[in-house]
Amino acid sequence: MRPHILGIDLGGTKVLAAVLDPDGKIVARARAKTRGWRNDEEVFRTIALTGHRALESAGVDQDHLAAVGIGAPGPIDFDTGSIIETANLKFKNFPLGPRLAEEFGRPAIVENDVNAGVYGELRAGAARGAREVLGVFVGTGIGGGLILNGALYRGFSKGAGEVGHIIVAAGGPRCGCGNRGCLEAVASRTAITRDIRKAIKRGYRGPVTKSLNKETDQLSGKDLKLAYDSGDQLVKRVIHRAAKLIGVGMGSLLNVLGLEIVVLGGGVVEAFGDDFVDRIERAARAIAFEINSENVKITRAELGDDAGVIGSAMLAREALNRNAQRQG
Ligand SMILES: [Zn+2]
């Protein structure tokens, strides 16, 4: 058996592990919920167990495992493979890379989760074969990743690619990052729900009113889509505005970067589908100069939940190959 790779995607609500064979095909998966952890050791044990379960169900033992790759939220110290901090998980300066390498007895790499997802789409999904790629994932927040000249772009600072925090509404709603009017603060599912909740409190009544969870004050992507499909005027207005603002940000980025392909994914894009993407695309192309608009493809992500595990596994394999070349 040739060497396999273990790819792991660590999210705010779940951890997904997958074993990829030498051809990059997923041969087994395992998942676990990631809520209610008390400390970083508990988080780590869940990640490790999920990885072991995926390996077991693939029938791959340590002798046939080449490397481990993980995509994780929060800023990462790429020199040490540590997670600097995560908002939802209990990590603070946690040496995730070294601990995974110790656990599985193989080299391990750590990448930002959104970057890993964009990289998966580059290697095996909607952006196959491209070199200048922007990925935008619209869900609870808005995450983004940038591939320039065929490689993940982190910038001199190592902090590049924060697409969710470009400002599209100066002086607008406060963002989790502290700034005002970030894309994430006006077009994520959290922002969409906030705007709908506010209108309901001011007296709006429509199909969406009943869907608002009385206890959590939240709307799921499914709730939003149902209300949208039943013709709720408020939901339509808020969704259309979100799409337009994502397009405004994207159009600006097209003019700065001159991209080849933009891949759109995440829960909101999956729930609202092609109509949502078309609206984003129209707004982006209205802003982009002709030279930056005519050759760019704007399309939906293809890999869904698998993007992160595939991307982190591919990154681990490529890091391994680079080291082998250096030593050989
Ligand atoms: Zn922000």
Image (spheres, helix red, strand yellow):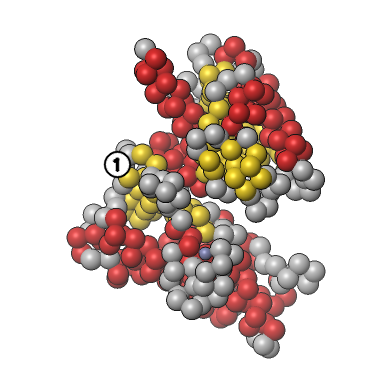
Q: Nearer the viewer, residue 314 or 170?
A: 170
- Dividing the image into 4 quarters, which one contains the C terminus? top left
Q: Describe residue 297's horizontal placement relative to residue 154 as left or right.
A: left
Q: Describe residue 235's horizontal placement relative to residue 133 as left or right.
A: right
Is residue 97 depicted above or below 13 in this figure?
above
Q: Describe residue 261's horizontal placement relative to residue 196 as left or right.
A: left
How many numbered badges does the structure rendering display? 1
**Residue 287 makes an appearance in the image:** yes
Query: Callout 1: 10 Å neighbours few (<14), some, many (20+)?
Result: few
Is residue 319 depicted above or below 31 in this figure?
above
Residue 275, percent from left and from top: 44, 64
Residue at 58% over, 49% down: 74
Q: Nearer the viewer, residue 230 or 194?
A: 194
**Residue 309 makes an appearance in the image:** no
Residue at 44% over, 58% down: 163
Query: Which residue is identified by label 1?
Result: 149
Type of amino acid under label 1? Asn
Residue at 19% over, 60% down: 291
Residue 40 occupies which quadrant of the picture? top right
The residue sitting at the left extreme is 291
Residue 33 occupies which quadrant of the picture? top right
The residue sitting at the bottom extreme is 203
Residue 103, percent from left and from top: 67, 24
Residue 210, percent from left and from top: 72, 75
Q: In what element is the residue under mark 1?
A: loop
Residue 141, percent from left and from top: 56, 60
Residue at 27% over, 65% down: 288
